[in-house]
Amino acid sequence: MIKFETSLGDFSIELNSAEAPITCQNFLEYVTSKHFDGTIFHRVIPNFVIQGGGMTPDMSQKKTRDPIKNESSNGLKNRRGTLSMARTNDPNSATSQFFVNLKDNAFLDPGPGNAGYAVFAYVADGMSVVDKIAAVSTGPKGGHEDVPKEPVLVSAVTVIDG
């Protein structure tokens, strides 16, 4: 299990390593290297997603490792409480950024003409904290939309025993 400590409370996630081995290994490497510590949830869209994993409070993007292969065809669905990798229009461009689905987002699953977004984990504890993050006031900042007006800081992300 992996614990997120944020300025609005803590939540824990469970990785789906069997279904998304490349994505989970990538995520764990970012966790153990402390990449996520000091980042923010920089994109918050109520009734859709909260996104984090790559921006500092001043909206600077952190340096990442090489992109990984998109594992969106692993059978896992973008349902409320699941975590998926964020990416550009290139399906194989995910690095460190991820999002938590706030509702079932079937249109993010793979399908004809749609590479989809790779689900790799789920919120095991603290979905109320995720919902609290989703409720913050947002606006434009640093060329981005839907940025929390008061930064939602991720102080630490650590691997914890089950």
Image: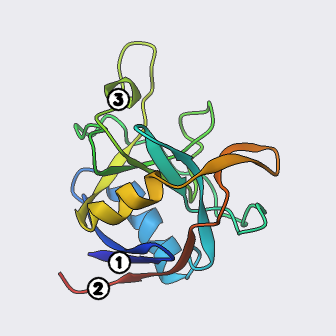
**For the residue labelled by badge 3, is the local secondary structure a helix, a strand or a loop?**
loop
Q: In the image, 28: left or right of 123?
A: right
Kind of residue at badge 2: Ile
- Which of 19/142 is in front? 142
- Which residue position holds label 3? 109
- Which residue position holds label 2? 160
Q: In the image, 5: left or right of 106?
A: right
Instruction: Residue at the far bottom: name it.
Output: 161
Q: How far across and down, in percent of the image, does residue 38 sit?
A: 62, 78
Cβ–Cβ below 8 Å for labels 2 and 1?
yes
Kind of residue at badge 3: Asp
Against 77, residue 37 (above or below) is: below
- Which residue position holds label 1? 3
Q: How far across and down, in percent of the image, does residue 147 sit?
A: 66, 51
- Quadrant location of the C terminus in the rendered image: bottom left
Residue at x 82%, y 51% (from the top left corner):
142
Alpha carbon of mark 3 to alpha carbon of mark 1: how far?
A: 26 Å
Tell me which corner region of the image, top left, top right, bottom left or bottom right, holds residue 12. bottom left
Instruction: Residue at the far right: name it.
Output: 142
Q: How far across and down, in percent of the image, does residue 57 sit?
A: 71, 69
Cβ–Cβ below 8 Å for labels 3 and 1?
no
Which of the marked residues, 3 or 1, is nearer the chain's N terminus?
A: 1
Residue at x 63%, y 49% (from the top left corner):
138
- Which of 18/56 is in front? 56
Alpha carbon of mark 2 to alpha carbon of mark 1: how far?
A: 7 Å
Tell me which corner region of the image, top left, top right, bottom left or bottom right, holds residue 60. bottom right
Against 113, residue 21 (above or below) is: below
Kind of residue at badge 1: Lys
Residue at x 76%, y 60% (from the top left corner):
59
Circle 1 packing at 10 Å, graded few (<14), some (14-19), many (20+), is: many
Residue 128: mark in rendering: none
